[in-house]
Image: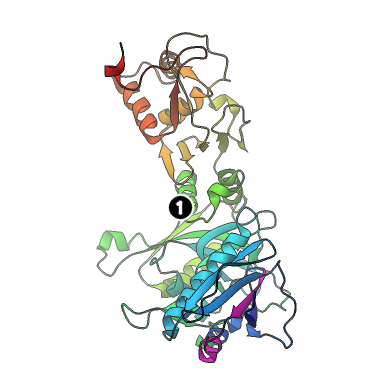
Amino acid sequence: MTETLVFTMRAMGAVVDVFAGPGVSSRLIETLVSAWTDCEACPAPEPSPPRNPEHVSIVLATRQNPVSATTVGSREVPVLTVDADVPRVAQEFTSLVTLELIRRHIGRMHLFHAAALMQPGTGQVVALVGPSGRGKTTASRALARAGWVYLSDETCAIDPETLAVLPYPKPLSIIAKPAEPKTQIAASALGLRHHDPASSVRPELARLVVLDRLDAGTRPHEDAARGLRCLPLLESLQVLAEQSSGLARTRDGLLRLAELADRIGGVDAVTYTDSSQLPELLADSLETRRDAGVEPWKYIAGSALGEPAGHDLPSSDLPGPVVPEPKGSERLYSRSVETCGIVTDHGMLLMHPERTVIYSELGADLWIEAGDGRTRHHLEERLSEIYGPPPPGAFDVVLDTILEDGGLVVSNPPGTASPPTDPEEQP
């Protein structure tokens, strides 16, 4: 790399080094340093220290002086092409920094699309989970104005062992004008309290809360539903999975997600019409004692060779052990090895590599019983033992639905040839 180190900052437990190529304006660099001041952004010392492969590195370059892909150590360094549109570049810089920090922590941290706010006296952190446009930044500003400590308005990184939350006080992305880039403003510039790295109070996750903001046209009966409620485990895990980064690339990611929800006593949803209602609602939530393990569950891998793991759901509540199936001409149905599931008394959340789906109790038992290979006859008999004889056609509907979802795969018994995929090709 021949670019110059122009400033460094600390974010999400990492050091970020920002380099600039020829022609990058000092105005842009000053704007970025100002916006990221709460992440201890400061101009680089002179002479520049040796490049550190343990740091996150980002290069700014102009179109007139392009920079080819480069590496520091074994890490590829991303390049952001800049121009005179400083607001747009500042917004893209924020997105790039966030993406690089997420990549650094995938597989090691819980990474949620969530705002994170801390009670200053206790270090208790509430993570407000939701997709883009759900109101995380607005909620962050409301809570910080009420005395909470701002940790992030977009990405919450949590250590799965200690529940420590890594502060990421990035600039708040605020819509100044519709259809224009969001303005990047430091929380401190808005008079909001942000985390002091020198503080003895360490942020630790206390609550995961899903934002459910009602619009201005809410009907009276919906408005009456405002407040906090504890979500059923399967529903909450589905939301968390959808708003997680790198979950499919995390070893036993769904299991770890369930363990996290279990440790903090479940996941809440907060329904509200105005962000000014949040400080009181969330403060009341922290004052309520929550016991871990409020809903029994089991984790089951797609391969029947994996041992179930979980909390308090008796093994007798699950179908019996997998036993060898006699050879024959009947086709076998087995769990997809790319899936895994969390099973409760109310059904199962099945995780595919890129999505999740909730199965009914019947669907869950069918998926579990299939194991590493069962015939249709065996599966129908086994479910009839559990639920009683099904109405005509009901079993086929459930089986076909799971096959279409990809939770089960079909194969021929060992030692038999696969039939042609097109019946017209048969002799």
Q: Image height check: is 290 above or below 132?
A: above
Query: Where 135 falls versus 111 (above or below)?
Result: below
Q: Quadrant of residue 73?
A: bottom right
- Amino acid type indicated by mark 1: Glu
Query: Does the magenta segment cover residue 12?
Result: no
State left or right for residue 9 relative to residue 96.
Answer: right
Dot 1 lies on which element? Answer: helix
Q: Is residue 350 left or right of residue 164?
A: left
State the colouring used for the structure image.
Answer: rainbow
Residue 270 location, x and y as percent?
A: 43, 61
Q: Residue at x 57, y 85 (%)?
A: 33
Please name the residue shown 56% across and 20% down the image.
Answer: 320
Taking the spot 57% from the left edge, 50% from the top edge, the residue there is 261
- Magenta residues, start to end: 14-31
Q: Judge by depth and name the residue closer to the eye, 242 or 64.
A: 64
Can the viewer see residue 116?
Answer: no
Name the quadrant containing residue 315: top right
- Residue at mark 1: 242
Q: Where's residue 377, x and y in %?
A: 41, 13
Depth check: give the residue in front, 210 or 288: 210
What percent of the width, then of the height, locates residue 96?
Answer: 52, 70
Label 1 CA crowd tier, 10 Å (few <14, some 14–19, many 20+) = some
The quadrant of the picture occupied by the N terminus is: bottom right
Q: Is residue 203 above or below residue 184?
A: above
Residue 28 magenta:
yes
**Residue 112: image x %, image y %?**
53, 59
